């Protein structure tokens, strides 16, 4: 008897909450829509773009992009970045030595 009472106490707030939901969110409405195969009111959106386009061919792959920097420019940039990193590490060490 007490289990039944507790079950009713647990289920009752959920049933009351279902009455406050919009029409398209109510569980019975969703079930009916699934069973009948109809769309819910919220599902009246446009189809995704390109849905009717033909499937692309494997040969339609675009060619590789040209590199932005030449090999020499990449090496020069790498050296500049390594120099900046070394300078930052040295500056950090110098600042830590002053404050300790």
Image (cartoon, grey):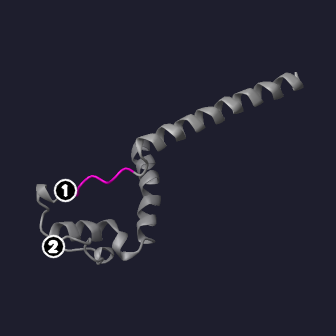
Q: Earlier in the sequence, mark 1 or mark 2?
A: 2
- Location of residue 4 in the rendering, given as x and y in whole percent from the top left corner: 39, 47
Residue at image position (28%, 71%) is 29
The residue sitting at 70% across, 32% down in the picture is: 87
Q: Quadrant of residue 95?
A: top right
Observer-nearest of 4 and 85: 85
Residue 61, labelled with which disc?
1
The residue singled out by tag 2 in the image is: 52
Q: Residue furthest right?
A: 99
Instruction: Identify the residue at image location x=15%, y=60%.
Output: 60
Give the CA separation, mark 1 to mark 2: 20 Å
Relative to 3, residue 57 above or below: below
Secondary structure type for disc 2: loop
- Who is closer to the viewer here, 31 or 73? 73
Q: Residue furthest front?
A: 72
Image depth: mark 1 or mark 2 in front: 1
Judged from the image, the secondary structure of the residue bearing numbered disc 1 is loop
- Picture coordinates of residue 20, whole percent (x, y): 45, 71
* Quarter placement of the C terminus: top right
Q: Determine whether label 1 and label 2 are within 8 Å by CB.
A: no
Q: Is residue 92 above or below residue 3?
A: above
78 part of magenta stretch? no
Q: Is residue 12 left or right of residue 48?
A: right
């Amino acid at each position: 008897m007490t289990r039944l009472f507790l079950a009713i106490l647990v289920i009752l707030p959920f049933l009351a909450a279902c009455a406050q939901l919009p029409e398209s969110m109510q569980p019975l409405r969703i079930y009916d829509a699934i069973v009948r195969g109809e769309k819910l009111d919220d599902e009246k959106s446009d189809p995704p773009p390109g849905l009717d386009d033909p499937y692309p061919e494997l040969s339609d792959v675009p060619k590789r992009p040209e590199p932005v920097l030449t090999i020499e420019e990449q090496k020069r940039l790498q050296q500049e970045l390594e120099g900046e990193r070394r300078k930052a590490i040295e500056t950090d060490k110098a600042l830590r030595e002053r404050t300790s």
